[in-house]
Image (cartoon, rainbow, N blue to C red):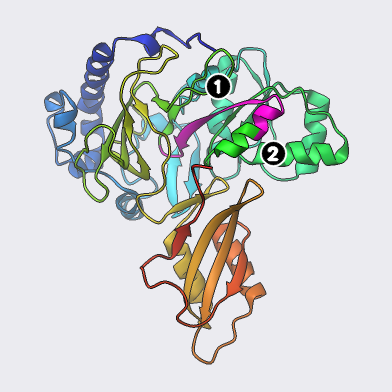
Amino acid sequence: MTSHFDDRETRAPDAREQETFDGLRKLLTGSLKRLPALASWLGNPDPESLVDRAALARLPVLRKPDLMQMQEANPPFGGLADPDALKGNRVFMSPGPVWEPQGLGVDPWASARALFAAGFRSGDLVHNSLAYHMTPGGFILDEGARALGCLVFPAGIGNTEAQVDAAVRLKPSGFTGTPDYLKTILEKADELGSDLSSIRRALVSGGALFPSLRQYYSDRGVSVLQSYATADLGVIAYESADANGAPHPGMIVNEDMIVEIVRPGTGDPVPEGEVGELVVTTLNPGYPLVRFGTGDLSAILPGVSPCGRTGQRIQGWMGRADQRTKVRGMFVDPKQVAEILKAHPEISRARLVVSRADDADVMTLLVEPATGAAPAADKIAKTLTAIAKLRGTVEIVAPSSLPNDGKVIADERDYSA
């Protein structure tokens, strides 16, 4: 696993920085003329002035609420996507709703590098269990795997027994999906007496790969690495490993990405090593997002990876700068909790608690009854599933028992265990 996808991964850092900003100026010279909404949002900057990170940091940060407002006013993409580049392409929806266009060309979300670093090679058969429905998750790794020359089985999510049967027959060497779903498949195979030992490597995304879960896979002879990706940007960063499959520290920032760590709620970069919100600029001519605030927390690691890739490294996903939380690969937003309260006037306050049990995400909605009301947990649970598109349990708690701290979503998962 010490070889590299191409020579770009081992460029001198100074050369990469210069070439990346050269590319940004060239991209924006054309894009700002073609996309007035982008030019207006950025304050009509002179592209030639964007010579380094200090210049870039003077531009505003675009966050999800801003993007949603722009898309609502100018559907579907807020005027930020190049219309000509979108012809014959796909559009996806994320919670919000937020609309995302597919990128251009082969491997439009730039996932092939991450797959290569995880040990995937041409000729591998890959079982892809990320969702292909509405969201781009399944397509992100599907396109990258096929660009590498892999044969992909588009399993999607759910119907675990059928997925086990397919894997037994196809004997895939690789798996792509959320961190915990491979465990679900392997345990179902054990229950059915099926042999899935053909799966030797995996690249997971859409959630945190907890150390205990990575060890579980290692004990079963499966080398698992993770990538950090979003529907808007594609693969932002990915892990690499040593010759024995052990992951190197941190995650390597993908080529053609400029990553900044800023103080949450601002656009101000923080010193190296300090935790802040991860902001990304991507050189995507079809959808050139500049200083896009992911809402995720991370930090820049010093130095370069032992694998020889010289790109900037981040600590990885370290939680949310806001309360928007990813559960089993899907974001849950505070606005969705508000929708549940509107649907059930018998609830006075609610708090969604996300935890872990048996290496799987668990979602519990704690609700306080309104004065004189008797909420029905089963009815509220159905509403929770309908709005969040995820199953969870509902627990009725005593009036005034929830903390008065402004939180409607509490992520109580331990990311160190």
User: Which mark, by number, is residue 183?
Assistant: 2
Q: Which residues are magenta?
A: 216-232
Where residue 331 sits: x, y (%)? 49, 51
Comparing 108 with 252, the one in front is 252
For the residues marked 2 and 1, what is the alpha-carbon distance in whole angstroms? 19 Å
The answer to whether any part of residue 70 appears in the image is yes
SS assignment at label 1: loop
| Amino acid under disc 2 | Lys
Residue ID at (14%, 37%): 58
| Image quadrant in which you'd find residue 391 | bottom right
- As rendered, which of 356 and 10 lies closer to the eye? 356
In the current view of this chain or complex, which residue is farthest to the bottom?
Answer: 372
Can residue 128 be seen?
no
Residue 329 sits inside the magenta stretch: no
Residue 381 in the figure: left or right of residue 32:
right
Report the disc number at residue 246.
1
Classify residue 204 as left or right of residue 16. right
> In the picture shown, does residue 60 fall above or below 107?
below
Q: Quadrant of residue 338?
A: bottom left
Q: Position of residue 261 (x, y in %)?
A: 28, 37
